[in-house]
């Protein structure tokens, strides 16, 4: 008989996360106001930018007409809507069926709600590992990203991040079946669902290896300690951010898993890849291209995985002319920063599931041969990379922290409005 999983969340979980979620809403509201102001000055429509350009058009078309639409370009490339995974269009169609909303309206509603659920999930993960103050700061850092405006677009990034964050939280707290089912849904949202599958499998296999014998019993789940001292955020500070107060990587990776039944862990591992695998196999059958037909569909968009060679050549090309050299140098700095953040995550002993997930998301984003302007938004789901920045922000006193958040929020809002009225996310 399969054991019942632990409850999804402790009593008062939403109340505990409320200050972080209010901060998130404030930052994103500022971004939307800046977008409306900038768009109004340029004579463009902020609503159109959020719901009816780039990928948002493809999603709403799938929601309304199903799959089968493609565009053949003069150079021979074929852009097929089969490149877009189905969960967001399904939700758009379902919401439009029960409300007066159009598919575009429904996509925006799903994105906005998903972004809030994603923020809550990011808080839950960071709170579990580092404490409540760090959790709140992690949510703010995610909201403050220069490309954070994508979180409010009818794109699938927010939906995927919401599913990924809660799936990882389920892994950290030993809810394996829930983790697997959420990963299944994430796999129906974006190809990067592979990162979540890898994280669940790595954590589950590690927990199998470290599982004590039945005669020894299983230790009770452990949680990152917190400090009784409060701050104006209403959250613990000293223990949540002190390296000496954090549990070891062994404790974080082992304790939440070792008490779970082997059956539930196996089920979680089984469920996790079914979403992505099911859609990829369906595309192969639908197109007659075989099990890996989805790769041919992506090739029509010039998307592939070349280990970063195309991206490296793109950066090198920028370094050969002026003023493009500044863009090339900025890209190099950005890549170095990402690598430094990941190394810092390892040094801070993040749980294995978070390290594997963030590592695979980053590798897929940087090493893909797709349109290079899309790489920043492809990194949005890699929220564990932001935890070192969140810890640094959490160490600041309230007033300096508020000044930093305020200044970065204004800069991020201005950049998002400028970006979306310019090249924008493809």
Image (tube, rainbow, N blue to C red):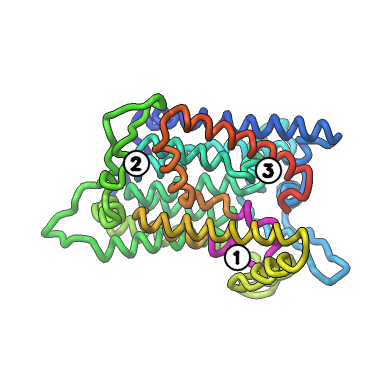
Q: CA distance from mark 1 to mark 3?
A: 23 Å
The residue under the point 40% across, 39% down is: 134
Q: Which circle, 1 or 2, is nearer the viewer?
A: 2
Q: In this orientation, which residue lies closer to the viewer: 109 or 236?
A: 236
Q: In this orientation, which residue lies closer to the viewer: 19 or 292?
A: 19
- Per the image, the residue denoted by label 1 is 280
* Residue 9 on image: x %, y %: 37, 37
- What stretch of residues is rendered in magenta? 362-378
Image quadrant assignment for residue 309: bottom right
Residue 58 falls within the magenta-colored stretch: no
Q: Earlier in the sequence, mark 1 or mark 3?
A: 3
For the stretch drawn in magenta, the main secondary structure is helix
Mark 1 surroundings: few (<14), some (14-19) or many (≥20) residues within 10 A: many
Query: Can you say which quadrant of the picture contains the C terminus?
Result: bottom right
- Per the image, the residue denoted by label 2 is 241
Image position of 236 (left or right of 34): left
Q: Secondary structure at mark 3?
A: loop
- Per the image, the residue denoted by label 3 is 154
Residue 370 falls within the magenta-colored stretch: yes
Q: CA distance from mark 3 to mark 2?
A: 35 Å
């Amino acid at each position: 008989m399969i054991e019942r999983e632990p409850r999804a969340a402790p009593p008062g979980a939403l109340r505990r996360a409320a200050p972080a979620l209010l901060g998130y809403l404030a930052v994103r509201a500022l971004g939307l106001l800046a977008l409306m102001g900038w768009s109004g000055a340029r004579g463009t429509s902020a609503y159109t930018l959020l719901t009816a350009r780039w990928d948002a058009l493809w999603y709403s078309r799938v929601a309304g007409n199903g799959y089968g639409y493609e565009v053949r370009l003069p150079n021979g490339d074929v852009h097929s809507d089969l490149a877009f995974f189905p969960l967001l269009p399904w939700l758009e169609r379902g919401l439009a069926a029960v409300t007066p909303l159009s598919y575009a309206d429904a996509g925006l509603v799903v994105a906005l709600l998903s972004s809030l659920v994603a923020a809550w999930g990011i808080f839950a993960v960071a709170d579990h590992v580092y404490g409540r103050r760090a959790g709140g700061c992690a949510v703010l850092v995610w909201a403050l990203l220069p490309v954070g405006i994508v979180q409010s677009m009818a794109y699938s990034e927010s939906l995927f991040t919401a599913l990924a964050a809660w799936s990882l939280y389920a892994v950290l707290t030993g809810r394996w079946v829930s983790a697997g089912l959420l990963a299944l849904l994430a796999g129906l949202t974006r190809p990067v669902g592979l990162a979540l599958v890898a994280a669940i499998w790595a954590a589950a296999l590690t927990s199998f290896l470290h599982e004590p014998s039945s005669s020894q019993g299983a230790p009770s789940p452990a949680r990152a300690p917190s400090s009784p001292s409060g701050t104006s955020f209403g959250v613990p500070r000293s223990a949540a951010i002190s390296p000496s107060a954090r549990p070891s990587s062994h404790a974080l990776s082992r304790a939440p898993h070792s008490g779970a039944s082997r059956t539930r862990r196996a089920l979680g591992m089984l469920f996790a890849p079914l979403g992505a695998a099911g859609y990829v196999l369906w595309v192969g059958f639908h197109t007659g291209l075989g099990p890996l037909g989805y790769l041919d569909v992506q090739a029509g968009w010039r998307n592939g995985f070349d280990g970063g060679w195309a991206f490296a050549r793109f950066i090198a090309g920028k370094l050969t002319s002026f003023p493009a050299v500044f863009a090339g140098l900025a890209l190099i700095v950005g890549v170095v920063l990402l690598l430094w953040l990941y190394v810092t995550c390892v040094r801070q002993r993040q749980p294995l599931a978070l390290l594997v997930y963030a590592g695979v998301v980053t590798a897929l984003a940087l090493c893909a041969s797709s349109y290079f302007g899309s790489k920043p938004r492809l990194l949005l789901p890699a929220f564990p990379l932001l935890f070192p920045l969140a810890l640094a922000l959490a160490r600041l006193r309230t007033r300096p922290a508020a000044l930093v958040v305020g200044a970065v929020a204004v800069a991020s809002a201005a950049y998002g409005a400028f970006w979306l009225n310019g090249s924008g996310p493809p």
